[in-house]
Image (tube, helix red, strand yellow):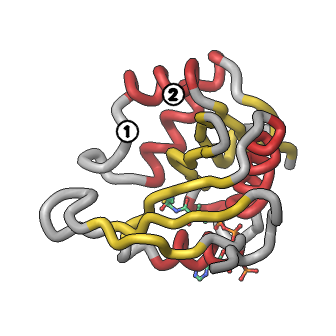
């Protein structure tokens, strides 16, 4: 397995992974994914094929994780953690000192991963994903990659 920067030719593979991870009403539309591939930092995990990807961007000292997807049949192999750590390194190299993400309060897998990586819940955002679908806004300081955020 290797992690590398995504290229334009990866769009079909990335869309296939997105489709495998999220239902149609929740998945990013193809044009949004294509825009993010052009404008955001996108990393893919691949063997013979793309097995997962992560997207995010930096704005000054802040950064944002936009999405993280691992194929269902390739989960619990450490791919999600490796993709996130690689993205955080990219963020730091682009000048970021902290990062943010949103995650559904019902997404136990992702929440467990983010807590393991040192993200802390900052705010509960009501109705973030639609009426009654709340999200945690989570934060991490990148000066101490891997360490829990201090109060
Ligand atoms: C969330 C997601 C990216 C995790 O990817 P993954 O490759 O399976 O995660 P990893 O194997 O790197 O897991 C790292 C750690 O996260 C936690 N974790 C991951 N999946 C978990 C699960 N199903 N149950 C409990 N803890 C879990 C564990 O602490 C795990 O470490 P361990 O395996 O040593 O116990 C994956 O489940 C996914 O693609 N889900 C659908 C898309 C999604 O919800 N993305 C996040 C949007 S915010």
Q: Is residue 150 left or right of residue 31?
A: right
Mark 2 near mark 1, Cβ–Cβ under 8 Å? yes
Q: Residue shown at 51%/45% (left/top)?
A: 66
Q: x%, y% of residue 129?
A: 26, 57
Q: Is residue 54 left or right of residue 121?
A: right
When asked about the image quadrant of residue 103, the answer is bottom left
> Which quadrant of the rendered structure holds the C terminus?
bottom right
Q: Residue shown at 75%/68% (left/top)?
A: 77
Reply above or below: 57 against 68.
above
The circle drawn on residue 41 is none
Q: Residue shown at 32%/52% (left/top)?
A: 23
Count of marks, rendered view: 2
Q: Which residue corresponds to mark 1? A: 28
Q: Residue shown at 18%/58% (left/top)?
A: 130
Q: x%, y% of residue 20?
A: 46, 50
Callout 2: few (<14), some (14-19), or many (20+) C-alpha neighbours within 10 Å? Answer: some
Check the image and name the residue furthest to the front: 151
Cα gap from disc 2 to disc 1, whole angstroms: 10 Å
Residue nearest the viewer, comparing 85 with 148: 148
Reply above or below: 69 against 75.
above
The circle drawn on residue 36 is 2
């Amino acid at each position: 397995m290797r992690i590398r920067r995504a290229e334009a030719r990866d769009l079909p593979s990335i869309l296939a992974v997105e489709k495998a991870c999220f239902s149609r009403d929740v998945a990013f539309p193809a044009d949004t994914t294509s825009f993010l591939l052009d404008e955001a930092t996108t990393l893919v995990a691949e063997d013979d094929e793309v097995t997962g990807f992560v997207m995010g961007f930096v704005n000054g000292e802040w950064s944002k994780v936009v999405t993280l997807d691992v194929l269902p049949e390739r989960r619990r192999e450490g791919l999600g953690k490796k993709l996130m750590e690689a993205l955080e390194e990219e963020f730091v190299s682009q000048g970021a000192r902290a990062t943010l993400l949103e995650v559904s309060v019902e997404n136990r897998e992702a929440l467990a991963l983010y807590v393991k990586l040192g993200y802390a819940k900052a705010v509960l955002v009501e109705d973030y994903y639609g009426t009654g679908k709340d999200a945690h806004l989570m934060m991490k300081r990148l000066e101490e990659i891997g360490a829990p955020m201090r109060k």
